Amino acid sequence: MRIYNSLTRKVEEIKSIRKGRIGIYTCGPTVYDYASIGNFRTYTTSDFLIRALKYFGFEVDFIMNLTDVGHLTGDNLGDADTGEDRMEKSAKKEGKNAWEIAEFYINAFLKDFEKLNLVKPKLFARATEHIAEQINLIKKLEQKGLTYKTSDGIYFDTKRFESTGKKYGVLSNLDSIKEGARVEPNPEKKNPRDFALWKFSPKKKKRHMEWDSPWGIGFPGWHIECSAMSMKYLGETFDIHVGGEDLRSTHHPNEMAQSEGATGKPFVNYWVHGAFLKVDGKRMGKSLGNAYTLSHIEERGFDSLALRYFYMTGHYRDILNFNWDALSASQRALTKLKNFVRVCKEEGETKRTSLSSEKLAKVENYCARFEEYISDDLKIPQALALAWEVVKSNIPNEDKLDLILSFDEVFGLNLGKIDISPKAVTNEVLELLKKRNELRKAGDFEQADAIRDKLKREFNYEVHDEPV
């Protein structure tokens, strides 16, 4: 299987460190708010990669972090070592403490993670549960002379790192980035590219989250957690690191530098970055009011997996533009695909007819093309188009179903779980019908139609109306 490696800027064959086994670390959310559909595009990209590797027979050791401390608001302004801790800022806003904020938004994230049918990692690693590992890693860097102390924390010395023969920032173009483009430069930094490993708590103020350390009471910098946790669970050198395109500029180069500075070994062999999601052709942002979440999707009557299907319509390295019309098209396509699978299942396991040599060749060709697409830098859009080609082909339905369900091992649309057994009308369905009738009487046909679509999508009920 081949993937684009941001480190080498080439599509390369994946050669695992351990035969038949792949270690993958994906940068997860900072849990101060709900994850956006932009965040989930990255996590879904990671999911497609994991599913594809499993499809080809690899065992996958998958770790994802949950950042619940240390990610400062200055990250949005060009310097991740400045500003407020996002957890504490959210706690102040919501009248809670940072620990309560973390629990609430972790639970919300895990629910959304499940709704999108993402493969669960072996561990969701929380930064606050790995403070000792982060302190020990900083100690190693200190012993190698790669740190220095300022009034606000312990910093990684990038110049000193480069003096050991290593190059800093090979994942990105950091040399062209000026510190303080939107914030005041830190005069105590030896070099603008240096970054915080440990931040001291403010004097005369107790933080919600702070720990004792050899350097004083404080909390870890944002970058150190990923190095400490990934190396603990996957080894000092592991196979694949996944994240969003935005992490290429500073977070991932900093991870690489501090990890390799501590161990003297290559950190990660393949770096995989997903492109941004735009909304109506514009960047996504909370200040713009377009940082939609999965709840926003569901409130409009869409199936969560319609969003997953939408992600599949664009290659992970290409910017994808979200709008409600595009999501509606994905919902219709997904419903059509589910209905096709349902029809095939309802036909039952009748005695299979022998395939002609021509149709057998077609089936084999579909299999080969699918494997070619997903093995060549995750060409999911082409694989999805191939699935529709199968649906429209003249091979028998039972063979179409076999192919589609095989493809769905990578697609993750839960097509194999479609239930065709007759169901009693539940109270939930009755309540939805009652609410829909009320909406129609009130003239709110848009919301009424959304409930009708939900009844079809989730319960397989066709609703036929009489005049109100």
Image (tube, rainbow, N blue to C red):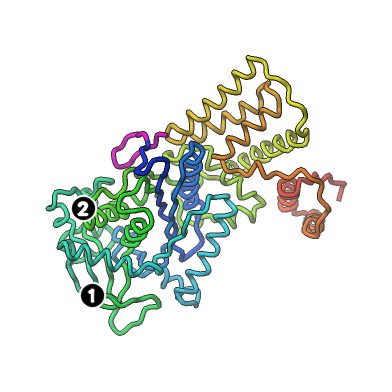
Residue 118, position in %: x, y? 54, 50
Position in image of residue 140 (x %, y %)? 22, 63
Q: Which mark is residue 90?
A: none
Residue position for label 1: 215
Horizontally, residue 431 falls left or right of residue 417, namely right
Q: Position of residue 352 (x, y in %)?
A: 73, 25
* Residue at x 37% of width, y 67% of height: 130
Separation (CA) of disc 2 from disc 1? 24 Å
Main secondary structure along the magenta-highlighted residues = strand
Can you name the residue that lies furthest to the top here? 357
Q: What number is the disc on residue 264? A: 2
The amino acid type, in three-letter code, at marker 1 is Trp
Question: Residue type at mark 2?
Answer: Gly
Is 132 placed above or below 437 here?
A: below
Q: Quadrant of residue 17?
A: top left
Query: Which segment is the magenta one?
Result: 1-13
